[in-house]
Amino acid sequence: MNPYRYLPVISDIDGIVWPGIPGPRGRSIVALLHQLQQSEWLAPEEIRRLQYMQASQLVRRAVRTVPFYRERLAAAGFSFERPLGPEEWRRIPLLTREDIQQQGEQLEARPYPKAHGAGSRSSTSGSTGKPVTVLTTAAGQLMWAAITLRDHIWHRRELWRKFAAIRKLKGHDTRERREITFDSWKAPVSDVFQSGPGAMLSINTALDEQLKWLRDVKPAYLLVYPTNLQALLDLCRRDGGGIPGLLQVRTMAEIVSPELRAQCREVLGIEIADMYSSQECGYFALQCPGHDHYLVQAESCLLEVLRDDGEPCAVGETGRVVVTPLLAFAMPLLRYEIGDYATVGGPSPCGRGLPVLDHILGRVRNMLVQPDGQRIWPAFGTRTLVKLAPIRQYQFIQHDRHRVEACFALWRPFEGDEERRVVEFLRDKMPEGIDFHVTVVDEIPRSAGGKYEDFVCKVRD
């Protein structure tokens, strides 16, 4: 089935309604989108060749316009007489979050190409405690827009239906309930396609009000943080209802577990479509249509998954994620170690040649440190946990190698032996030598950017 059959293009030219001719920005997005729809079917080796060709252009420009890179790469003995290949590329030192914070505007190209359009600064929320500010351009925003539309087309979304989002609203930092309505899905969809109405609700809204709002608004598509979705699913299960008319849930900004996917299917009868991105770099990967794995957006970024020795991970191995935004000419971020871990996947059964990530596992601070010092990805059995006691929200904080604090916000106070059963259940899930103590709180707040982590390790190596 041709997805465009259901996606009428908006026309910017008087008297022409079909075929639609969008405005200048829309035409640029469509031109990029057309290329993305061709390149995703290229062979993996051809995609890699094109990536390194583009990356070589970025490196040459960075050396000419950013003293930080000129000095760093000269010290590494680089020569740029020919395009870089994988071996030369891996000789470029990794860029850390601390590098970006310390160098600040010294990482900006002076000048960057005028044809890339107006520059604008964007700051991360600092959920890691280390916020960074980057300079982006209009060209980079066009790529972001095209990949957003690629995601809609991949998942065959019916754009004339209603869209809703529950997230942090820009400019609204209070804990008050805020709601905004739109007559379209807004940019970039409205730059190209005709679309239905949209609505947004502040993440600060109480959970029961969120669910009531969704049942009143009846969206076909919902964009939400995974942890907020988990809470909504728990509430739906408690009251025995669902969310009428919902066709798909889109998630962002946090880790989506297999258990959450299964619970969404069980409670709402629908699928999750996740996206992997960052504020400073844009899109990294989109969930493959019809599957749970992720396809790296190779036209936008060069993404590496590395072992501890710096070599690339093989299929099935988990390692550190290192990214290079390929259009970031205003502020090059060459081999930026973002702090995430991911598992490399094999070729996608969909036939696309884009690189595959089987799982995105989170950051090193989301790994539990065992008494012997080894790190593992924890599994707390939260689907069972919420059935043992009236737990509304949960967050686990590891303070040292032997002690984890379980913070719970409850629907009602513990009764009988509920707290003891919870602690015993958690002890059985963890390696020997790790104990739990429970702290009951009124609410577990989200970060300034609206994100929420259900496990945080504060143990220092």
Image (tube, grey):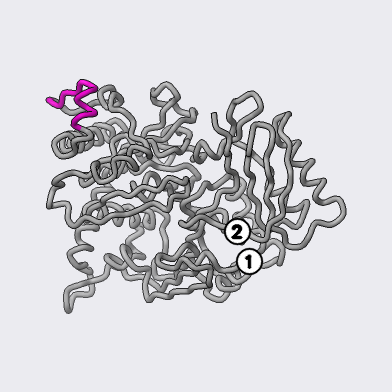
SS of the residue under disc 1: loop
Which span of residues is magenta-colored? 70-81
Picture coordinates of residue 164, whole percent (x, y): 47, 67
- The residue drawn where x is 46% and y is 56% is 449
Q: Which residue is mark 1?
A: 242
Residue extending farthest to the bottom is 15
- The residue drawn where x is 50% and y is 49% is 254
Question: Can residue 327 be spotted in the picture?
Answer: no
Q: Which residue is mark 2?
A: 269
Is disc 1 in contact with disc 2, using a CB cutoff of under 8 Å? yes
Asked whether, in this view, residue 325 is left or right of residue 395, the answer is left
Depth check: 86 or 419 in front? 419
Judge whether 66 appears above or below 269 on screen: above
- Looking at the rendered image, the disc whose residue lies closer to the viewer, 1 or 2, is 1
Picture coordinates of residue 104, whole percent (x, y): 29, 44
Does the magenta run of residues contain 40?
Answer: no
Depth check: 284 or 241 in front? 284
Question: Can residue 338 be spotted in the picture?
Answer: yes
Picture coordinates of residue 8, whole percent (x, y): 31, 68
| Badge number at residue 364 | none
Query: Which amino acid lies under the numbered mark 1 shown in the image of this protein?
Result: Gly
